[in-house]
Image (cartoon, helix red, strand yellow):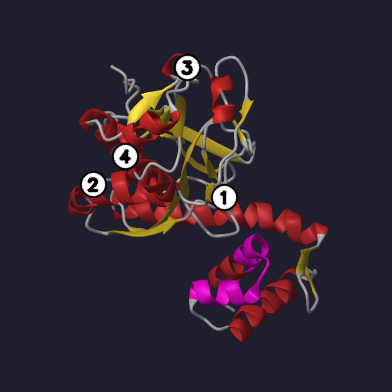
Amino acid sequence: MDKLTAMTSFVRAVETGSFSAVARELGIGQPNVSRHIAALEQTLGTQLLHRSTRRLTVTPEGQRYYEQARLALDVIGKAESDARGQQNPQGLLRIACSPALGVEKIIGVMPAFMARYPDIRLDLRLSDAYADLVAEGLDLAIRGGVLADSALRARRIGSSERVHVASPAYLDAWGTPETPDDLARHQCVLYTYMASGDTWPFRDGDKPVSGRMRIDNLEGIRRAVLDGIGIGYLPGWMVWEHVKNGSLRVVLAAHAMPPTPLHAVYAAQRLLPRRAVVFIDYLAAVFADTPGLNGVPLAA
């Protein structure tokens, strides 16, 4: 039995809840995953997983073994990275972030990063849906707001304000809202994944908003706002150039919430690989010089 492969198979089976997912990830076939874990159980003399046609369940013994095995695999990964040289991080780095941030602010600065670290490969997962780092085998996720999940750790890499914007044509037709209460008489373009639902936060409290269009993608909201469909609530970095060139106007700036931090988050129980550390360092340096991500207000 290849104990390292068996440990990896077991750990990822716990994290993904699926032998087939582990098989795809490791490229070894589902029957081999099952055999590796069965051999591990036989060697340890205890059952690690309860198997059924619907799901995998970790036994108490399996949970204890998982916690130590996860740490052991991270230590092995770090030792291999150290042995290859601290200045030459390598391997596959899996990152999750929103499509808008990834396309506009990350992909474009990756050529310089990849030239600096030629042995790092990137797997960038772009989705507005919440990513489960452990279950999806991700090293990092880029997220805005206050970190609430105690199973995650975070490093601040920037700061992003959210602003209310509308096109000049929309404001000419509907008028300019002076207070958050005025939004009751306006069309607002709603974001499907907004944590607060159909309310927008302001310094003096949340206000319910409504509109005829709801979109699950920030890029789509920006397009709708540019086309005069309604007022949007968007990250400042997404509309920075549009506001500066006059194609969008900021409204309700005096009532807006203060900027929120942007974090690189990772699982608390994992050792952060060197390739992830240098990626975070690089992105933090880039964002420090990026309008809308460096704490400089859009109105400045």
Distance from disc 1 to disc 3, alpha carbons, whole Å, reads 34 Å
Which residue is depicted at the point 55% across and 22% down? Answer: 182
- CB contact under 8 Å: marks 1 and 2: no
Question: Which residue bears the numbered disc 2?
Answer: 109
- Amino acid type of disc 2? Val
Q: Name the residue nearer the viewer: 104 or 232.
A: 232
Which residue is depicted at the point 60% across and 64% down? Answer: 12
- CB contact under 8 Å: marks 4 and 2: yes
Question: Which residue bears the numbered disc 1?
Answer: 130
Foreground disc of the pair 4, 2: 2
Q: Name the residue nearer the viewer: 300 or 67.
A: 300
| Secondary structure state at the residue bearing disc 2 | helix
| Secondary structure state at the residue bearing disc 1 | loop
Foreground disc of the pair 3, 2: 3
| Quarter of the rendering containing residue 250 | top left
Which residue is depicted at the point 55% across and 27% down? Answer: 183
- CB contact under 8 Å: marks 1 and 3: no
Question: Which residue bears the numbered disc 3?
Answer: 178
Residue 283 is tagged as: 4
Position in image of residue 272 (x %, y %): 46, 45
Q: Name the residue nearer the viewer: 156 or 76.
A: 156
- Boundaries of the magenta span: 10-26
Figure check: 142 above or below 64 = above
Position in image of residue 111 (x %, y %): 20, 53
